[in-house]
Image (cartoon, coloured by chain):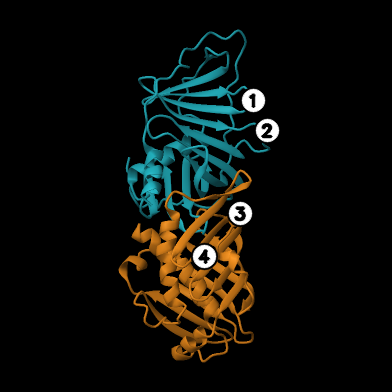
Amino acid sequence: MKRLIWLLAAFLSVSCQTGHEIQLRQPKQSIYCPCPYPQTKSRFIHAIEVYRSSEAQTALIGVTLVDPVSRSVSCALMSAEGMAVLEVSSTPAGMEISRALPPLDSPNFARNMLDDIEMIFLAPRSTDVQKGTLADGRQVCRYPDEDGWLDVVHAEDGGIEFKRYTKTGSLSRSVTLVDGASNSYEAIEVSVPGIFRYRLKMSLIETQTSGDELFAPDSNKGGDK
Amino acid sequence: MRRCASAIKILFFCAVIGLMWPAGAPADDFDALRRDAARIRTISADFVQHKHMKILSRPLVSEGRFYFAAPDSIRWQYNKPLKSIVLSSQGNTRRYFFSGGKIVEDTAGGAQVMGLVLGEVAAWMKGEFEANPSFVASIKEGADTVVTMTPAEKNIAGMMEKIEITLSRKEPSIKTVRIVENSSTETRINFSNVVINGQINPSLFQEVP
């Protein structure tokens, strides 16, 4: 269990690794920015495998509900047996943890997980987009924000990569939406470099476009922002 | 870790108590339950689990199979959507899941939690449900018999409101176990093809798949 705690704690740690893909060059042709994000309220159910070596160490079920209009996200993590260990949601007004069992009961864990989900499923907030090519020739759209910047890159295999960098240029997260799938979110790989390096492989079980259901946060309750 | 273990314990508790409850016995006769439980050597059953949560517009459906052999061997197997197997026998508990087309042992600590859970399942197999201080049981007779179990301990009450076990009065089998966590979250497990004291290959409790 301690290893599970350690693994999941690592999920929210931001590790340091010097980035080497941070120089933009002027493109020779126009660049379009990848936009895999859902345009309507959508729900995704993934099987999530957690890796620290070449072999998976554990597996969970994750449910993600995103609303691009209100920029709201909700997420639940369940064991394979269906026991919900975490239910959390976020709107621009704040975050609400409706259920969190140890070792996932840290607000920091919930906040960082929601940040990752927003990076993957919601278009960047920043409208200040820089377009160019990286040193390796791949086209990139760069979105600066107060924490650093996000690069959205056309991967060589046709997929899409999200790379989150800190202000100092350290790569903190790398996410790949694997190409070849019928849904952009059918196969997702999350990689966190550094001392607590780990990988998540997410395989889509089911996706739904939602109706008018309400998001989890109670409008009468305050948030953490 | 204890709360996580308690949460999973509840799931197994519900499944086991439901499968072992002898339909047809006087519902308020816990002594009869204990006597009947002592006669059970093996149980096997298919199950379909519906998980209802506020975040889901329709329930997440899981399917699998459950095996028990006295005194303490259990195989709890989910076939979909996430293939996983928990094996417990002679105090040794292991958890497996499928990854990349092959079966892999869970090394993240899940088996330790399951070991704690299944250690207590052995006690429940003796039919000593009244002695369990974690729940207060009540019975309602109707077209079916519904046993409602309410948490008596604070740490469990924080995770769930009640368990409802519906027993058929027409057939000697359990119908449904319903675990209500809160007003918007519940787990319903429907059992079918329940076989009591049938032949089960002992290797099922030792090997995967």
The residue at the point 65 percent across, 38 percent down is A183
What residue is drawn where x is 43% and y is 30%? A193
Q: What kind of element bears circle 4?
A: strand
Q: Residue at x 39, y 29 (%)?
A: A194
Please state the chain letter of the residue tagged with numbered disc 1 in the rendered image: A
Residue located beneath label 1 in the image: A157
Q: Quadrant of the C terminus of chain A?
A: top left
Examine the image and state in which quarter residue A38 appears: top right
Tell me the crowding category of disc 4: few under 14, some 14 to 19, or many 20 or more residues within 10 angstroms, Cα based: many
Is disc 4 on the same chain as disc 3?
Answer: yes
- Residue A216's disc is none
Q: Residues within 10 Å of mark 2 (few under 14, many from 20)?
A: few
Residue at 44% in and 88% down:
B30
Q: Nearer the viewer, residue B3 or B73?
A: B73
Mark sitting on residue B187: 4
Whether residue A4 is visible: yes
Rendered colour, chain B: orange
Q: Position of residue A212 (x, y in %)?
A: 56, 51
Q: Say few, some or many: other residues with alpha carbon within 10 Å of mark 3 (under 14 / 14 to 19 / 20 or more).
A: some
> Is there a contact, CB below 8 Å, between mark 1 and mark 2?
yes
Asked which secondary structure carries label 1, the reply is loop
> From the viewer's perspective, is the residue at label 4 or at label 2 nearer?
2
Q: Whole-Å distance between the Cαs marked 1 and 2?
A: 9 Å
A51 lies left or right of B24: left
**x, y percentage for residue B50?**
57, 63
Q: Where does label 3 land, which residue?
A: B81
A219 displayed left or right of B195: left
Instruction: Identify which amino acid the numbered label 3 is placed on.
Output: Pro
Residue type at mark 1 is Asp
Q: Alpha-carbon distance for marks 3 and 1?
A: 28 Å
Q: Chain of mark 2?
A: A
In the rendering, at what x and y percent does residue A110 appear?
38, 44
